[in-house]
Amino acid sequence: MADHAGEHEPVVESVMEKINEKLHDHNSSSSDSEDEKEKISSVDAVKAKIYRLFGRERPVHKVLGGGKPADIFLWRDKKITAGVLGFATSLWVLFELLQYHLLTLVCHILILALAVLFLWSNASTFINKSPPQIPDVILPEDIVLGVAAALRIEINRALEVFRDIASGKELKKFLGVIAGLWVLSILGNCWNFLTLFYICFVLLHTVPVLYEKFEDQVDAFAEKAEAEIKKQYAVFNVKVLSKIPRGPLKDKKLL
């Protein structure tokens, strides 16, 4: 019996060693996973402390809505973006530089399209070709209602902001809107609406991609600029704004 027990002792010891090795591996893997989690949380904490322009927490692609429009704005598909900018530039040259009018252009396009389709439909019997298949174009009701509902929400939001500014509750917002309208009035004296729209369109397709490329440098400069603006506004508030008398205004809820 003693010999038999002695034969089983190495087997038991080997089994115990394997169990200890597995426990050690499990503990090391769990500790590694905990370390990785701590590293990830520390990285997230560092990212949260980094200043981003306008308090942005998502990537630029997500801020622009994602999908195809964001790909066009950020030049993910260079051919489509270049085509869009080329088309907008051709329209601006056509209307602004060549002094071509929109109504005249629309009428000429419709005349050409109707003439081609009419001649093609009547000449199809002589040239042994099928007439053109003109599809039925019908605007879906749900799309029209969705656009109208979204437009209504934005108009109501703009009216609410206008009411808050006019009631004298938001002095900072009032000054910002006045400054923005004043800048727009100056730009309106320099360029007409079409040129301003074209400039905004070009900026929309160039500024986001440049910001994404030089994101860290722009955010660092914006942080310093924002701190300086807040400092100057605090001084202006103490010296000027705080001395302006304000009348008693009661908040009224819109029914």
Image (cartoon, rainbow, N blue to C red):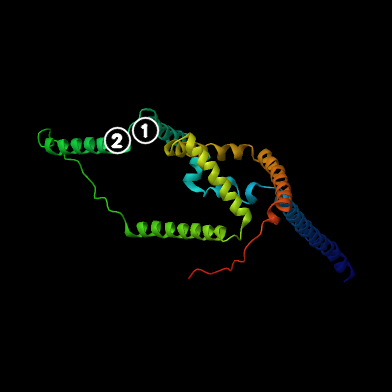
Query: 144 or 131, which lies in front?
Result: 144
Query: 123 or 190, which lies in front?
Result: 190
Q: Marks 2/1: CA distance?
A: 9 Å
In this rendering, position of residue 223 left or right of residue 168: right
Query: 7 or 50, which lies in front?
Result: 50
Q: Which mark is residue 211?
A: none
Q: Earlier in the sequence, mark 2 or mark 1?
A: 1
> Looking at the image, which residue sits at the far top?
98
> Looking at the image, which residue sits at the far left?
126
Q: Residue at x 70, y 52 (%)?
A: 237
In this rendering, position of residue 87 left or right of residue 229: left
Query: Badge 1, how many Cα within 10 Å: few under 14, some, many 20+?
Result: some
In this picture, is 10 found above or below 36? below
Looking at the picture, which amino acid does disc 2 mark?
Leu
Query: Badge 2, how many Cα within 10 Å: few under 14, some, many 20+?
Result: few
Looking at the picture, which amino acid does disc 1 mark?
Phe
Query: 104 or 204, which lies in front?
Result: 104
Counting from the top left corner in percent of width and height, residue 175 is at: 61, 50
Q: What secondary structure is marked by label 1?
A: helix
Q: Is residue 75 visible?
A: no
Q: Residue at x 43, y 59 (%)?
A: 152
Counting from the top left corner in percent of width and height, residue 22 is at: 77, 59
Counting from the top left corner in percent of width and height, residue 40 is at: 72, 53
Quadrant location, the N terminus: bottom right
Counting from the top left corner in percent of width and height, residue 201 is at: 47, 39
Q: Residue at x 83, y 65 (%)?
A: 12
**Residue under circle 1?**
95
**Residue under circle 2?**
105
In this rendering, position of residue 167 left or right of residue 45: left
Q: Is residue 206 visible?
A: yes
- Proximity of marks 2 and 1: CB atoms separated by less than 8 Å: yes
